[in-house]
Image (cartoon, grey):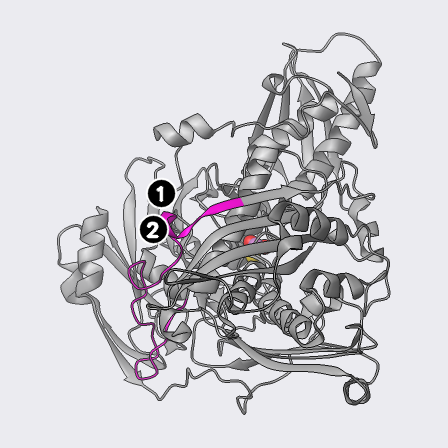
Amino acid sequence: MTTTTGTTTTTGAFGTARTRVEGREKVTGAARYSGDIPLPDLAHGWMVLSTVARGRVSAVESEPVLAMPGVLAVIHHENAPRVNLDYMGMIGKPDPIIGVFQHDRVPFMGWPVALVLAERPEQAREAAEALVVRYDQEPHDIGFTYGHPDMYTPPDSPFGAAVATKGDVEAELAASTFVVDSEYTTPEEHHNPMEPHAATAHWDGGRLEVFDSNQGSTMVAAELAQIFSLDAESVRVRSEHVGGGFGSKTTRPHQVAAAMAATLLHRPVRVVMTRRQMFSTIGYRSPTAQRVRLGADESGRLRVLDHRSECVTSTVHEFVERSATVGRVMYDADAHYTSDRVVRLDVPSPTFMRAPGEAPGSFALECAMDELAEKTGVDPIELRVRNEPDRGPVSGLPFSSRNLVACYEEGARRFGWADRDPRPGVRREGRWLLGTGMAAASFHSGAGPSTAAVTAEADGTFTVRINAADIGTGARTAINLIAADALAVDPERVRVVMADSDLGPAMLAGGSMGTRSWAWAVAIAVSELRERLALGGDIPPEGITARSDTTEAIGALASKERHSFGAQFAEVAVDVTSGEVRVRRMLGIFAAGRIVNPLTARNQFVGGMIWGISMALHEEAVRDRASGGLVSPDLAGYHFAANADVPVVEADWVDDPDPDDPVGIKGVGEVGIVGAAAAISNAVWHATGVRHRNLPIRPDRVL
Ligand code: MOS
């Protein structure tokens, strides 16, 4: 069946459930990840990280280590070639940690101080562990607190203004019938993609070639060219398969160290980060301390939304976890004040981590809304509906589409919300107290410039070439479906070539913008190709290729508020004897644009929601004030939800095509985690009558 939607003719491939095209390769072990690429004469690098939190490296005692079996070299600040870090990358200025071994200063515990190179990884590791590095230690400060005296307001960035205001907050608060004034904290949280960061670098005919685990080879190749002062054409980065990313798989120290070592040794070099090393080198989510003040009239209509969040960054790089920005989108109010402030401490630089800003920000805001529901006696869903904006509450811009109320309605119906007794602490089942809670979600929706090429081959098949990254999201499969749909052919006739910087520039897999950005470029190239094919004639042996570049097309997106939305529901049981919280079921209903592949989109939503369970109940990196380092930076000490913690999690969506996108996509990568922890926390309150404003909700905090 062929139907017409928007500008494209569809075969129905779009929106059909397809398993991953590379799924068989992955589950049989045939898929090669960047640490698996076999190259002749490969040497192995092992990173050595600082064991003090602040000071200078006074000596790197390489000599004894160089005598160990197989050891080839030790690179450190005294012998490393100088690199360039003065550039603006796709996601901002580089974090100086990626310019490895450039000086003797140590700005935090776990800073790269040396790379030991050997014939075999075991030899490199043994030598790295034996390497003596001496330091002149200085006092450090890692203590993040709300209202830290050095807290400052950062400059505005493309990711949002630090402060946004509307109306008179204090006057509206004074005039409010109901006021919520609460403080919330979220801990330091760490990325742990299943595949560690790994790069294999070598020089190939005058070009630096890197096999790397990343979210965007365009980004990494461009940065490596900048860092080593090479022509852009002299660097090629490929990332055929990537085992997870979510913000950390950008340009990090491992690619630079591998490329530097390959240059010095004149042979291929692989650097794989260990799980423990990743806790200080790949970025993480800053802890946050947030204060939310809500003022409402007698009907629950907001007069004030005041959300002030504080976070931490390192002394060498500014990254701000913009937790307060979510309120600028969610609720109307006569007065708004939202601010994100930051303090520089002797800790590693934080970075983007799934729903940066919205994840911790929605915890505070959506818990505060639940507290307001309790105070006003208005049902939590009804309260949110009463405060739905018809334009951006602060920007005044129209929404491209906002189907949040449809999410509430569908979610309430499926979850059985209508039967809910609002009173807290009154449902008991043996030693368990039971409760339900909900929260709203949003995540901004955008697109980045991309290029694509689509070829009609002489044998009747089609080849799509685009430098997309599949970090486990099913991007390769989505692109296959999008192209097949636009070409009006069976997906089996389309092959997708991707994850190679030689294919030309494209958006990274980040900001929930990957699939949308790539689909846009593919859609334009296909419509151009179809026009040419419509002229008739034979296809020559080399095929007929159409190319696209969306740089101009996506510029028009700025004129509206664009977001995915969602409604999260959770049911919990709280053990009154141990304080353990068990999530019994979760439901998320999303309005996140047109869904390309229901199978992998559901996987994204459910994955985000499970991460929300982790955020609510488990995840917490504890920093030791004495050493400045983390206590137990590994998967034994850093807890997240295991299978036994995950109940039935359902995700579904309402119809919500983006009206301004050629194929109607918005983005599904991040909205799934947003609001999930708040829904669980609100359910814990409903079960017990106690508010938990500090994550994670550990048993000792519940009792
Ligand atoms: Mo995601 S935090 O945009 O990789």
The tag on residue 272 is: 2
Q: Is residue 434 visible?
A: yes
Q: Please, what secondary structure does the residue beneath circle 2 have?
A: strand
| Screen quadrant of the C terminus | bottom left
Expressed as whole percent of the image width and height from the top left, the position of residue 491 reads 62, 21
Residue that appears at 43% across and 76% down: 347
In the image, 388 versus 577, the foreground residue is: 577
- What residue would you read off at disc 1? 35
- Name the magenta segment's main secondary structure: loop
Q: Are marks 1 and 2 in contact (CB under 8 Å)?
A: yes
Q: Estimate how packed mark 2 is, as few (under 14), some (14 to 19) or many (20 or more) residues with alpha carbons within 10 Å.
A: many
Magenta range: 620-649
The one of 375 and 38 positioned closer to us in this rendering: 375
Between residues 343 and 229, which one lies in front from this camera angle?
343
Q: Identify which residue is drawn at 30% across, 80% down.
A: 627
355 relative to 538, above or below: below
Q: Distance between the residues labelled 1 and 2?
A: 7 Å
Where does residue 216 sit, x and y in percent of width and height? 56, 47
